Image (cartoon, grey):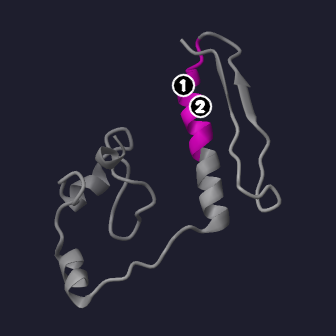
Amino acid sequence: MPCGFCYHIVCFDDEMWSQEPVIYRAESEDEDVSWIFVERLERDIKKIHKEFNFSKKMIFTDEERLEFNRAEKCWICDLPLNKMESLTRSEITVISRENIEEPCIKYVT
């Protein structure tokens, strides 16, 4: 069972972005250190994405746009789009036409 962790996110240019290493030590054996690690790392990744705005405009041909708008299932996991939006975070990360912030869980694994 893990009792602590450390990670350091670096950038190719420290003047552009830098962060001190994250160090965590559990204070009791009841703490879920693995969960805390994932939550902290996810928080830092979201902060970086928000600061640098990595979003890019999707470029579609007319045919591709029509196909995209007609889609009823996720091309990654094959679940219906409306069902995917209603699942809990533990089942699958949220993905929809309007909000594609995180990848489908089947794409990640």
Q: Residue at x 64, y 47 (%)?
A: 44
52 left or right of 42 in image: right
Q: Residue furthest bottom?
A: 62
As measured in the structure, the alpha-carbon distance from the residue carrying label 2 to the one carrying label 1 is: 5 Å
* Amino acid marked by disc 1: Ser
103 left or right of 20 in image: left
Label for residue 72?
none
Label for residue 37?
2
The magenta-colored residue range is: 30-42
Q: Residue furthest right?
A: 15
98 left or right of 77 in image: right
Residue nearest the observer in this picture, 88 or 77: 77
Examine the structure image and report whether residue 68 is included in the region drawn in magenta: no
Circle 1: is it few (<14), some (14-19), or many (20+) Cα within 10 Å? Answer: few
Q: From this view, report whether residue 57 is shown above or below residue 52.
A: below
Examine the structure image and report whether residue 39 is included in the region drawn in magenta: yes
Circle 2: is it few (<14), some (14-19), or many (20+) Cα within 10 Å? Answer: some
Residue 92 at x, y = what percent?
A: 33, 45
* Amino acid marked by disc 2: Phe
Residue nearest the observer in this picture, 38 or 58: 58
Residue 7 at x, y = what percent?
A: 67, 34
The picture quadrant where one finds residue 74 is bottom left
Which residue is tagged 1? 34
> Which is the main secondary structure of the residues drawn in magenta?
helix
Q: From this view, report whether residue 97 is shown above or below residue 21.
A: below
Is disc 2 in contact with disc 1, using a CB cutoff of under 8 Å? yes
Residue 91 at x, y = what percent?
A: 31, 40
Q: From this view, report whether residue 24 is shown above or below residue 89.
A: above
**Quadrant (top left, top right, bottom left, bottom right) of the C terminus:** top left
